[in-house]
């Protein structure tokens, strides 16, 4: 019977949390199936569920988490509610849902991730020294974080009492928190991948991670993120010789394009263009910002429709490239993009192997009887040279 259940609200978050345990030898699996049969988890130490609730209305997110935790509760000794380290999504409603499902009055919440310069001081969450609402997460086009006070963010979504927000500015702070809570109060906790690493140690996972498999030399990035951190990483990579393919407005927003002959032909053209170079497939095109806005307005698209169309377009193009013989070390940025890609290739479970860099998780999947290695990360992580570093360091 699995010892630990982790519930994340997006795919990359599920992987970067699950890898904290798999890298210590825990048998770990990441799933997306809301109706998962827990008997299939026999022999696992850690089961990670991607609930895909970040973009849902708060009430629907509550219902999804509450139902899943109620069904899973008797199967696990510990439950960890993973939250976004930038505090996006339905944090308050989802924490309340887990508490209600377990009939608990208190729940420790440690939102900091000091290794990624995300800390909580006096109840205020900071990203790289800036209050989160003033950071890049406050400018997110889909889910801007409008408050930096963690308790205030929670209160916007729930009136549930008992969610205990802990300050932390270092890993030693978080270790002290875990020690002070003791194993009994760790039965239901919440936070991001930062406290998950501490939890893994506290629960006694101390084995070795899986080995990095042999991978093709060519590096290929699939990016649906609009985060400025990732945009700078792609700009840097392009300046250092990466071929960058940007989807046009018609390609990324016309809902018929992913299944069209135009998509097929574009993929064949791109394969020739990237034959001898590392490459990026980017859903963003800075030169078509005005055209994008005009298309959205003329087709009366809401922000959620835009998000879904973009993720489907770029992942359909990526699948078409694989179908036409792309051989590369794959990397996918953004939870929406990763989920759409896995849906296109018919994959519903992943096993995290190890972290290549902090926040960059290596996993693999099988498609058309062929095994592919793929790295994943969320949009807001990493130094400017991250892509170049990864492409040069992994053989």
Image (tube, grey):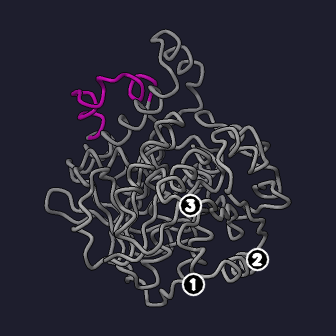
Confirm whether residue 277 shows in the render.
Answer: no
Give the spatial CA distance, label 2 vs label 3: 25 Å
Please name which of the two marks, 2 or 3, marks the residue nearer to the observer. 3
Q: Residue furthest left?
A: 369
Q: How far across and how far down the image is residue 198, in percent?
A: 61, 78
Q: Which residue: 59% across, 62% down? A: 190
Q: Which residue: 23% across, 27% down? A: 260
Q: Counting residues from the N terminus, which is met first, the one under dot 1 or under dot 3?
A: 3
Q: Mark 2 highlights which residue?
A: 173
Give the spatial CA distance, label 1 vs label 3: 21 Å
Residue 315 in the image: above or below residue 5: above
Secondary structure found at label 2: helix
Q: Which residues are magenta?
A: 248-267
Q: Mark 1 highlights which residue?
A: 202
Give the spatial CA distance, label 2 vs label 1: 14 Å
Q: Residue furthest top?
A: 298
């Amino acid at each position: 019977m699995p010892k630990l259940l982790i519930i994340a609200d997006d795919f990359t978050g599920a992987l970067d949390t699950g890898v904290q345990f798999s890298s210590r030898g825990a048998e770990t699996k990441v799933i997306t199936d809301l109706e998962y049969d827990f008997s299939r988890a026999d022999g696992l130490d850690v089961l990670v569920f991607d609930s895909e609730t970040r973009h849902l209305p708060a009430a629907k997110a509550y219902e999804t988490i509450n139902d899943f935790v109620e069904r899973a509760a008797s199967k696990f000794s510990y439950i960890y509610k993973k939250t976004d380290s930038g505090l996006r999504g339905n944090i308050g409603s989802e924490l309340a849902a887990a508490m209600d499902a377990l009939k608990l009055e208190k729940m420790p919440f440690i939102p900091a991730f000091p290794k990624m310069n995300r800390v909580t001081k006096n109840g205020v969450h900071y990203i790289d020294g800036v209050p989160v609402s003033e950071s890049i997460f406050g400018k997110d086009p889909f889910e801007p974080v409008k408050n930096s006070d963690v308790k205030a963010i929670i209160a916007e979504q729930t009136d549930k009492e008992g969610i205990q927000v802990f300050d932390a500015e270092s890993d030693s702070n978080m270790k002290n928190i875990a020690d002070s809570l003791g194993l009994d109060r760790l039965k239901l906790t919440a936070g991001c991948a930062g406290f998950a690493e501490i939890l893994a140690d506290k629960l006694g996972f101390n084995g070795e991670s899986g080995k990095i498999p042999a991978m093709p030399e060519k590096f290929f990035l699939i990016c649906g993120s609009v985060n400025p951190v990732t945009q700078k990483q792609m700009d840097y990579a392009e300046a250092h010789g990466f071929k960058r393919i940007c989807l046009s407005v018609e390609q990324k927003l016309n809902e018929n394009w992913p299944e069209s002959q135009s998509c097929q032909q574009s993929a064949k053209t791109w394969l020739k263009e990237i034959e001898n170079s590392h490459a990026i497939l980017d859903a963003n095109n800075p030169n078509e910002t005005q055209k994008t806005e005009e298309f959205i307005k003329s087709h009366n698209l809401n922000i959620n429709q835009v998000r879904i169309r973009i993720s489907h377009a770029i992942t359909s193009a990526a699948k078409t490239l694989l179908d036409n013989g792309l051989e590369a070390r794959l990397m996918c940025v953004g939870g929406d993009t990763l989920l759409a890609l896995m849906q296109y290739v018919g994959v519903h479970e992943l096993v995290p192997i190890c972290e290549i860099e902090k926040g960059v998780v290596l996993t693999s999947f099988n498609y058309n009887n062929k095994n592919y290695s793929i790295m994943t990360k969320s949009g807001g992580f990493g130094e400017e040279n991250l892509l170049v570093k990864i492409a040069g360091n992994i053989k």
